[in-house]
Image (cartoon, coloured by chain):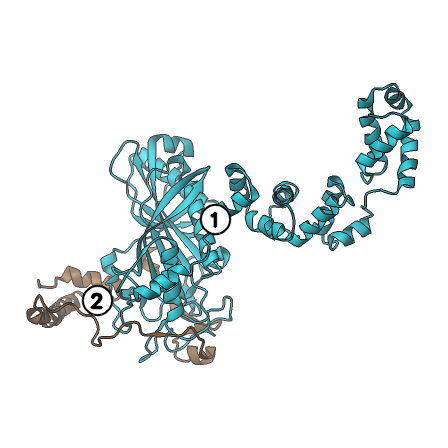
Amino acid sequence: MSAITRDEVAHLARLSRLALADAELDHYATQLDAIIGAVARVAEVATDDVPPSSHALPLTNVYRPDETRPSLTPQQALAAAPAVEDDRFRVPRILGEEA
Amino acid sequence: MADTLATMPFDEALERFEPVLGLETHVELGTTSKMFCGCRTTFGAPPNTHVCPVCLALPGALPVANDKAIESTIRIGLALNCTIAEWCRFARKNYFYPDMPKNYQISQYDEPLCVNGYLDVEVGGSTVRVEIERVHLEEDTGKSTHVGGATGRIHGADYSIVDYNRAGIPLVEIVTKPIPGTDRLAPEVARAYVTELRELMRALGVSDVRMEEGSLRCDVNVSLMPRGASEWGTRTETKNVNSLRSVERAVRGEIERQAAVLADGGKIVQETRHFHEDTGATTSGRSKEEAQDYRYFPEPDLLPIAPAPEWIEELRSELPELPSARRRRLQAEWAVSDLDMAAMHNAGAIDLVEATVAAGVPAADARKWWMGELARRANESGTALADLPITPAQIARVVELVASGALNDKLARQVLEGVLAGEGSPDEVVEARGLRIVSDEGELTSIIDQVLSANADAADKVRAGKIAAVGALVGGVMKASRGKADAGRARELILERLGVSE
């Protein structure tokens, strides 16, 4: 696994809508590199006879029937919202810098 | 936005360029509950009343897939002649956009449930095979309302407010392979495909497919290449295309716009564009994120889907008659030409004619009324045939009255007019407007006598053996009775009174 570059961190930050300072880009590049390096060690033990897996349980087809259950009330749903308007979650401008 | 507004006339654009189409259609499934939780899916509920910890992504909440949604997606795949995956997974599509509270949408990525199918559509009397790349299952997003700014659109808005009722409703995405070679029929092919897909969904009963309510939505991909070129051009993806007519207009508009850009030496940018219902034009939206920017990975909270082959075969054997097969059957039953059938299809008359025939009317009569008088009136008032305030049963009654001799065609048209004007059932209109054919011999005879004395010349000609002249006299009787006389009987009586026989 190659080292994570500052540009890659900057790209990731843009996708995540995070404003990172220059110093933070270096800081996170080093950290992410260490994290990915740790995860990559899995590849060392995976041999050809170990198929890739995404789940810990050997189960498939776990479904629920198409039946309704009670929902939250709008008051409950919105209780933890930082801002509310007209029973809706109010969020900051979405495409400010790109419009 | 540095958008050039220039367009090239459609015909000129097609002389210089060849279009390649691609269509991505989203269908909201008509399940009772959401894809991964038990919240209702009813359209138009007050904001944030159909939400729960799962679809609001509250900590610790876990999704479980809706079995009916899986089944419906497989049925759609089978009806589109797809191969159904033996094993596939959901995937997380990560993006930072407040229409999903999780900051990702559960979708499918490299393992769609259904692949490699096709849908045949009829355009201008010939069949075009549209190949289907994939059909996958995902969840719909919440609905954002953009506040502030002049247009109510995302650009220029001060902030947005979000209703998550729609977040988590099962959504099936149907993606075509690129469709080359449609040439100047491209706009019609696009429209015919979405129309056929909508009918297919209806026949399967998997969705109410209401474009105006967003339960069927279409993204239109268009690219152009110079005539004779072998490499396809850069495509754009137009969203917000919310009616069949708009599908056609969006393709046409994008061909005209791209042709102008290319002819001017410009380059097409791969981007999302927004369709404007009022002008038929598109404007630039955000430039598309690359697939890798979504950082797809297998959804760890949901187990793989591995539909049993026996279950798939069972679903296949239970598929209803599909729209194209039904049209072929009805065409044979009604004994109409390809052209007439296509005309009925385009006019949205097939269900209506079928229901009218089921109410006991000969197919030719049912077709005559729906495609004649009623199509004309629908056209005049700009409504769909099916939305006219008249039922197949009412048409059947009018046809019955004509067949029994109580009405002639002219009176029948007046009865239809009355029913459409909300004056009641056909019988009520006949009664209220006094539209019955005058078959009372006494009344008819007295009208005939008046007409004969007022048209002595014509009467003399008939007496002298010029039977053709009787037409004018019958016309006079019809006029005097304001169309209510039985023309055949009037003719007989006139000849009898003038002492002439044929």
Q: Residues within 10 Å of mark 1 (few under 14, many from 20)?
A: many
Residue B244 — which label? Answer: 1
Amino acid type at circle 2 is Leu
- The chain that appears brown in the image is A
Q: Amino acid at mark 1?
A: Leu
Coordinates of residue B105 in the picture (x, y in percent)? 32, 66
Q: Chain of mark 1?
A: B
The image shows residue B476 at horizontal and vertical percentages of: 84, 31
Disc 2 designates what residue? A20
Q: Residue at x 38, y 73 (%)?
A: B55
Residue B38 or residue B366, whichever sits in front:
B366
Residue mark closest to the camera, 2 vs 1: 1
Residue sitting at 88 percent across and 43 percent down? Answer: B440
Q: Residue furthest front?
A: B501
Q: Chain of mark 2?
A: A
Label 2: element kind = loop
- Determine which quarter of the picture holds residue A83: bottom left
Q: Quadrant of residue B123?
A: top left
Instruction: Answer above or below: position of B254 versus B200.
Output: above
* Distance between mark 2 and mark 1 Cα atoms: 45 Å
Which image quarter is the N terminus of chain A in? bottom left
**Whether residue B288 can be seen here:** yes
Q: Is residue B287 above or below residue B137?
A: above
Q: Residue at x 25, y 55 (%)?
A: B290
Q: Residues within 10 Å of mark 2 (few under 14, many from 20)?
A: some
Place of residue B214 in the rendered image (x, y in percent of width and height, measured from the top left): 46, 59
Q: In the rendered image, what is the letter of the chain coloured cyan?
A: B
Q: In the visual, does A95 lie left or right of B438?
A: left
